[in-house]
Image (cartoon, rainbow, N blue to C red):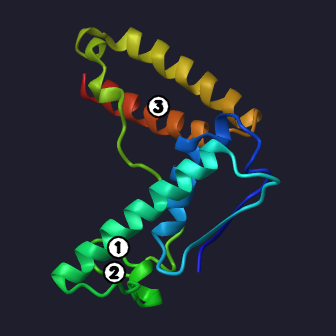
Amino acid sequence: MALVAILDADKEGFLRSNRSLVQTAGRAARNINGRVIMYADKITESMRMTIEETNRRREKQIKYNTENGIVPQQIKKSKTSVFATADGKSRKNMGYVENTETTIAADPLIAYMNKEDFQKQITNTKRKMELAARELDFMEAARLRDEMFELEKLVAEK
């Protein structure tokens, strides 16, 4: 069950406008037992319009369901299917998988660099990697490490 409570719903403003209230109510409506409770001292124009729009949409949906013989049902998935990947394998024991693609080969300047330029770039990348590690930005440090290894491979090929 999705329960959405809108406190101070009668306070007009950005998050209490007709559009925002309709969007908020729509989020709850996606659940078969969704409910929206608007707490207010008085019914504002935005609240009235939201209630009318919600009722209009509900009537339209009920009419469509009746005409087409549709009985709304909650989607039931097994717990394992929620954690399955596209190929059907379970993700239950998978941890973070780092992106293995390196972007250094896509640099258009690589084709025009000589060994000296590569060495300068490797030194610069190593300095940036060490700085990232000192600042505890290990993801950036790992990315720079991979970039440095890719540069070293390209130097060996030249």
Q: Which of marks 2 and 3 is in front?
A: 2
The residue tagged 3 is 148
- Categorize mark 1 by other alpha carbons within 10 Å: few (<14), some (14-19), many (20+): few
Pointers 2 and 1 in contact (C-beta within 8 Å):
yes
The residue tagged 1 is 85
Q: Residue at x 62, y 50 (%)?
A: 47
Q: In which quarter of the image is residue 67?
A: bottom left
Identify residue type, mark 1: Thr
Q: In this view, does 19 lie to the left or right of 44?
A: left
Above or below, comparing residue 50 to residue 134 in the picture: below
Give the number of the disc on residue 52. Answer: none
Looking at the image, the residue that sits furthest to the left is: 68
Above or below, comparing residue 55 to residue 23 in the picture: below
Pointers 2 and 3 in contact (C-beta within 8 Å):
no
Which image quarter holds the N terminus? bottom right
Identify residue type, mark 2: Lys
The residue tagged 2 is 89
- The number of numbered discs placed on residues in the rendered structure image is 3
Classify mark 2: helix, strand or loop. Answer: loop
